[in-house]
Amino acid sequence: MKANGANVGIVIVSHSPLIARGTADMVRQMVGDSVPLSWCGGNAEGGLGTSASDILAAIAAAWSEAGVAVFVDLGGAETNSEMAIEMLEPARARRVAICNAPVVEGAVIAAAEASGGATLSKVVATAEELSP
Amino acid sequence: MEAGQSFLPGLIEACSAAIAHNADHLCLLDQEIGDGDHGTNMRRGCEAVFEERHMLAGLPLPQALERIGMTLVMSVGGASGPLYGTLLVELGRGLAGEEPGVQKGFSSALSRAVDAVARRGRSGAGEKTLLDVLYPVQSEVRMQSTLDNIAIEAQAAAERTVAMKAERGRASFLGDRSIGHMDPGACSCALLTGAICRYLGETEGA
């Protein structure tokens, strides 16, 4: 564990709010409450979509001084996440990473790693081992 | 590029109207090769900018463009929000250091902004995206073409995306089946270019 006890936070971004929320449920049930966790998905009309403002809010909700790992599904989720990270103050932006990993498996494995107090780079590397 | 307090609100109104009139068509195009919400997303973004038009008119043009870009990022959603947002933000930043009203200044700012869109989307020419309209428009601007010719080329460029195979975005999942449909982003980009050129022509003549 790090001195301040803060674990890396996890953010899940899917075009579908059902997938984002369901993935968050899996993380909570499999890993527990020791990891800051947030999710977002869907557009303002209740359809599929992602938005930079929702992602910003999710990063804020899962904020940890140890950093935040973001999991995304398709194209726009990643583009909007990049945009959201650039909108953070630089000191925070440096501590947010988008993981190149499958959303469900990546989020669960990353959260398990984070719950043991691993650094952001270790959490990201563990999740990205899942990608071919 | 200058003019009074009514210039920018008028331009915003012209762009919003072009999108509002064609929102259903943009959604139909997007249903063919995407998720069908491009018209809805763009209309939402234009409405958000429209709401701010009088506040924006009080800002210097570069700052106003940057602000419009951020509003689009926060309101459009989808992949087009960050792409159009990046275009406007970078255009504003590019113009911030330039002498107002100089054509060369606008051309280089536009070029820089289009390159930023390509980086944001990790895309390039010929991949059936809005870049396939932005690059030709940028080249017309660099050659100091007339407003009419810029608008005509934008429309022609959008038509050329019909024959292209999508390499980026959700349409790329369709592979060859994306051929035969106009890219919705290219379509909205041509519509906006046309609206801007018409408005500039009208205010120039006024």
Image (tube, rainbow, N blue to C red):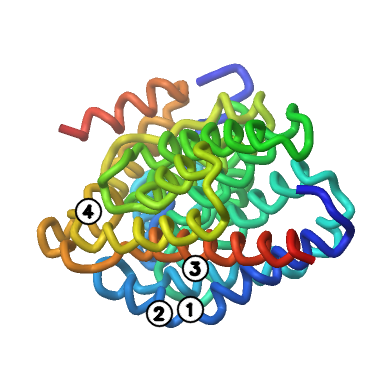
Front residue of this view, candidates B75 and A29: B75
> From what the image shows, is residue B134 above or below residue A18?
above
On whether disc 3 and disc 4 are found on a single subunit, the reply is no
- Under circle 4, the secondary element is loop
Q: Circle 2 is placed at which residue position?
A: B25
Chain letter of mark 2 equals B
Q: Which badge, 1 or 4, is on the more N-terminal residue?
A: 1
Question: What amino acid is found at the position of numbered circle 3 in the picture?
Answer: Asn
> From what the image shows, is residue B113 above or below residue A119?
below
Answer few, some or many: residues within 10 Å of disc 3's Cα (few below 14, many 20 plus, some between 14 and 19): many
Left or right of A10? Residue A131 is left
On whether disc 2 and disc 4 are found on a single subunit, the reply is yes
Q: Do the residues labelled 1 and 4 touch (CB within 8 Å)?
A: no
Question: What amino acid is found at the position of numbered circle 1 in the picture?
Answer: Asn
On whether disc 1 and disc 4 are found on a single subunit, the reply is yes
What distance separates the C-alpha of mark 2 from that of mark 1? 5 Å
**Residue positioned most to the top:** A3
Left or right of B199? Residue B153 is left
Answer few, some or many: residues within 10 Å of disc 2's Cα (few below 14, many 20 plus, some between 14 and 19): some
At 30% across and 27% down in the image, what residue appears? A126
Q: Where is residue A33 in the image (x, y as percent from the top left)?
A: 49, 46
Q: Where is residue A15 in the image (x, y as percent from the top left)?
A: 39, 61
Q: Circle 3 is placed at which residue position?
A: A43
Q: Position of residue B114 (x, y in %)?
A: 49, 39
Answer few, some or many: residues within 10 Å of disc 1's Cα (few below 14, many 20 plus, some between 14 and 19): some
What distance separates the C-alpha of mark 1 from that of mark 4? 22 Å
